[in-house]
Amino acid sequence: MKELFTLIQKIKENPVIYIDKPSITCLRSFLSGYIDSLITLGFTDINSCGMEGFQEWVQERAKTNMTQSWAGILVFSCGSDRNAFYSFFELFEKFIKQKNDSEIQGSEDVLRLRQDLMFPRFDIYNEILSNIKKRPGMFLGRSSITRLDMLLRGYSLARREVGVPPTEPEREFEGFQSWVEEKYGINSGQSWAKIILFYSVDEHEALQKFFELFEEYLNEI
């Protein structure tokens, strides 16, 4: 299983493989799904990890009491989502160096996370999609199909890394990509999220359309 720091380094070196583009909001959503998956599976402890205290550290460094996530604060201070992405790695390295050795577990330890990423512990393909549909802002930060896509990617990667067989809902979801391509008559290699977004006015409408399409897909299979 990749450790958090190893995964973050790989994303830094080639973000396109994991999150399509250099984006701090995509990175945060991806990490949320990745770590929540490990928590749900029991491979992690929610009370401490390499990122323990990062939210507060970013707030203190920015001299702000903003209720936004660390990603939101970085976007505000860096001026853009892309700039914040590149700034994150330098800041995270500085943060780690300042942590006490007792707070940084060895490379063989399992990943741990505190509730900075604010994601509950349940089956992402059942309860989570239902809850996101009702309150997308609470789980994604804002109504965004891209953030949903990144979260699901992180979730799936974590499960693959620990060798957990896909659940029935996961197997059902695997066919959604080809179904969307066929529905729109597209074979471009773009993700289902990008295809739906292309045919929508904005991220918000695309997310709403996703749930409509996904329900239609489930009724057909």
Image (cartoon, rainbow, N blue to C red):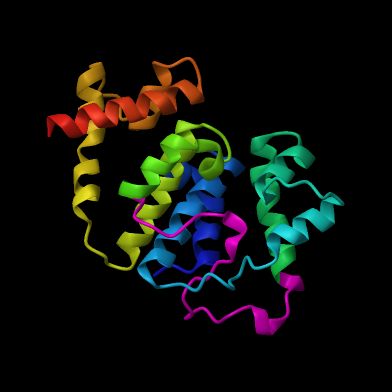
Q: Is residue 125 above or below residue 212?
A: below
Image point (33%, 68%), residue name: 162
Q: Is residue 85 above or below residue 167?
A: above
**Extreme-left residue of the structure:** 221
Please give left or right for residue 44 compared with residue 27 in the image: left
Residue 176 in the image: state x and y as whole percent.
24, 35
Q: Nearer the viewer, residue 128 or 82?
A: 128
The quadrant of the rendering that contains the C terminus is: top left
Residue 6 in the image: state x and y as whole percent.
51, 65
Check residue 3 for magenta coloring. Answer: no
Dividing the picture into quadrants, the one containing residue 1 is: bottom left
Q: Is residue 79 above or below residue 32?
A: above
Q: Which region of the structure is painted magenta? A: 97-124
Check residue 115 for magenta coloring. Answer: yes
Image point (43%, 28%), residue name: 207
Residue 20 visible here = no
Q: Nearer the viewer, residue 59 or 188?
A: 59
**Extreme-right residue of the structure:** 63
Image point (71%, 39%), residue name: 75
Dividing the picture into quadrants, the one containing residue 100 is: bottom right
Image point (40%, 73%), residue name: 43
Please give left or right for residue 221 compared with residue 40 in the image: left
Q: Main secondary structure of the magenta part?
A: loop
Residue 24 in the image: state x and y as whole percent.
61, 43
Residue 77 visible here = yes
Q: Nearer the viewer, residue 102 or 22?
A: 102
Residue 11 in the image: state x and y as whole percent.
51, 52
